Amino acid sequence: GENVEQHPSTLSVQEGDSAVIKCTYSDSASNYFPWYKQELGKRPQLIIDIRSNVGEKKDQRIAVTLNKTAKHFSLHITETQPEDSAVYFCAASINGNNRLAFGKGNQVVVIP
Amino acid sequence: EAQVTQNPRYLITVTGKKLTVTCSQNMNHEYMSWYRQDPGLGLRQIYYSMNVEVTDKGDVPEGYKVSRKEKRNFPLILESPSPNQTSLYFCASSWEDGYNEQFFGPGTRLTVL
């Protein structure tokens, strides 16, 4: 089945710097890759997603890039702010049964 | 307001005492799902449902049951809870299937003694 891994597990950045989280997946048939943000004590919420027919997608300070050949995709956060501190989950579609496989999550800490 | 609700939000129970966690959504979503979140293990899917009367196992279904008699509701049933089911549970819903934005409920923190 699909296996999704996230690196690094914890990332600390200075406010204003950029943060990059990388995910790898195992199933070459996966075609949908969302990123969810979970603030402390709250529910996960979708922040950006990408489908396999595009290589990059941006939404203000957030971008996701996809490399299907290498089977990895990355979340880029520019000009980080304290409110970006959270756990970020990546996921990949499990082809053929309408499900997502989630990674274990990355803790991002933005240091003021 | 479009939302997914779960009840109860917190529950402490004892081993073997049957319990039900309710999940309801008001967005007319076809797809609903239950996840458990444990430290260091991320989100793991328990069961999911593509529509009314259609349910299927996720990655960790052992010890759980679900039903989907109505489109809006997707209760999670623990017939005989055990301490290893102590966890944070999330219900989620989306259009059609899991390949659209999944809207998560607020979570239910369950402790089984």
Image: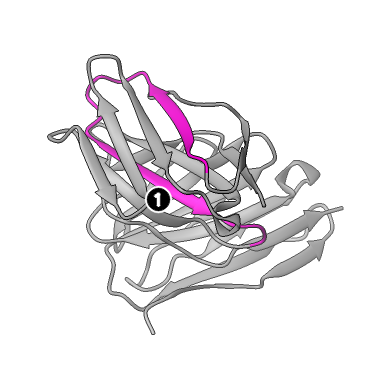
Say which residue appears at 70% left-offset and 60% top-offset: B109
Is A28 on the left or on the right of B14, as rendered?
left
* The image quarter in which residue B50 lies: bottom left
Q: Is residue B41 visible?
A: yes
Residue closest to the eye, A62 or A2: A62
Q: Height in image: B19 above or below B63?
A: below
Q: Is residue A104 left or right of residue A40?
A: left
| Way the structure is coloured | one colour
Residue B47, x across and y down, in percent: 46, 48
The amino acid type, in three-letter code, at marker 1 is Tyr
Q: Quadrant of residue B101?
A: bottom left
Q: Residue furthest left?
A: A53
Examine the structure image and report whether residue A26 is included in the region drawn in magenta.
yes
Residue displayed at 43% across by 27% down:
A23
Residue at mark 1: B48
Was residue B78 drawn as part of the magenta stretch in this picture? no
Where residue B97 sits: x, y (%)?
Answer: 26, 51
The image shows residue A48, relative to residue B12, as above or below, that is above
> In the depicted view, which residue is nearer to us: B73 or A7?
A7
- The answer to whether residue B112 is above or below residue A74 is below
The chain letter under disc 1 is B
- Image coordinates of residue A2 in percent, x first then y, are 38, 24
Looking at the image, residue A81 sits to the left or right of residue A71; the answer is: right
In terms of secondary structure, where does tag 1 sit? Answer: strand
Residue B62 visible in image: no
Q: Is residue A63 left or right of residue A29?
A: right
- Which x, y percent locates residue B65? 53, 52
Q: Nearer the viewer, residue A17 or A83?
A: A17
Q: Residue at x 22, y 24 (%)?
A: A29
In which quadrant of the rendered image does the N terminus of chain A lie?
Answer: top left
Range shown magenta: A17-41
What residue do we see at 25% from left, 19% from top? A28
